[in-house]
Image (tube, rainbow, N blue to C red):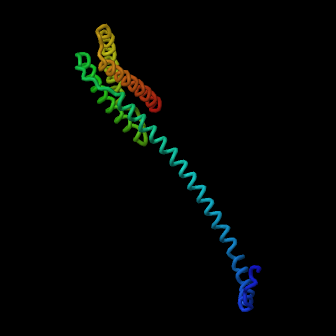
Amino acid sequence: MALGDGETGKDEAISDDDTPKVLSFADKLAPEVDALRDALLSQDKLLKRAARERKEYKEKLEQALKDSELARSSVTVTEETECDTCAIHMSSLVTLQNKYGTLLDEHDELKARSILLGACKSYSGLQSELAEKNDKISALEKASSDSTAVARCALCESLELELESCRHDKMRSEEENTYLRTILS
């Protein structure tokens, strides 16, 4: 018995009438089905890429956490007492940091002015202050070179590094001042 042999004539008449309607309805839905299928494939690709990126970021996070933990464990804080040289360097450093902050504020104020006309009124004061700073730095360098013969602690070395950083910042400020002088001239 073949498929459809057992159907009655009544069912065939109904299915024959509905066939063109179903086919035309299916033809109308085909583009929408294709668009939905494409959207589904696109979402599938996006989900796969997002999962892959998530896995990569998770691995990077784990590595960063391991590196952070390693860095934390390698830092050791010693309970060294400060020597006399450390106290001198520390007070010099604090003084230089305060003056550097003041100079930066003044520099920012000069940059903020819209028009710089005429001669700089604080030029002579700045020159004398610069000469003072140079003398202090020379004295500190001399004291620093004298103290190299004595056993040095780690804190002294770090303070000297910070002092060198301040010297660099001072030199940069001098260069900016020279530049401003040329502009004002």
Is residue 95 toward the left or the right of residue 42 in the image?
left
Give the answer, above or below, for where 177 lies relative to 48. above
**Which image quadrant: the N terminus?**
bottom right
Residue drawn 56% across the image and 55% down it = 47
Identify which residue, 21 or 42, lies in the foreground. Answer: 21
Left or right: 82 as drawn, with respect to 184? left
Residue 5 is left or right of residue 175, and the answer is right
Q: Position of residue 111 (x, y in %)?
A: 41, 38
Q: Name the quadrant containing residue 180.
A: top left
Which is nearer the eye, 110 or 157?
157
- Residue most toward the front? 1
Return the residue nearer the eye: 16 or 8.
8
Residue 154 x/y as whole percent: 31, 18
In the displayed orientation, state which residue is furthest to the bottom: 10
- What residue is drawn where x is 25% and y is 16%? 85
Between 9 and 16, which is closer to the camera in this rendering?
Answer: 9
Residue at position x 73%, y 90% in the image: 8
Residue closest to the far top: 149
Q: Residue 87 location in percent, x, y?
A: 24, 20
User: Which image quadrant is residue 23 in?
Assistant: bottom right
Residue occupying image coordinates x 32% and y 17%? 135
Residue 53 lies, with reference to residue 89, above or below; the image says: below
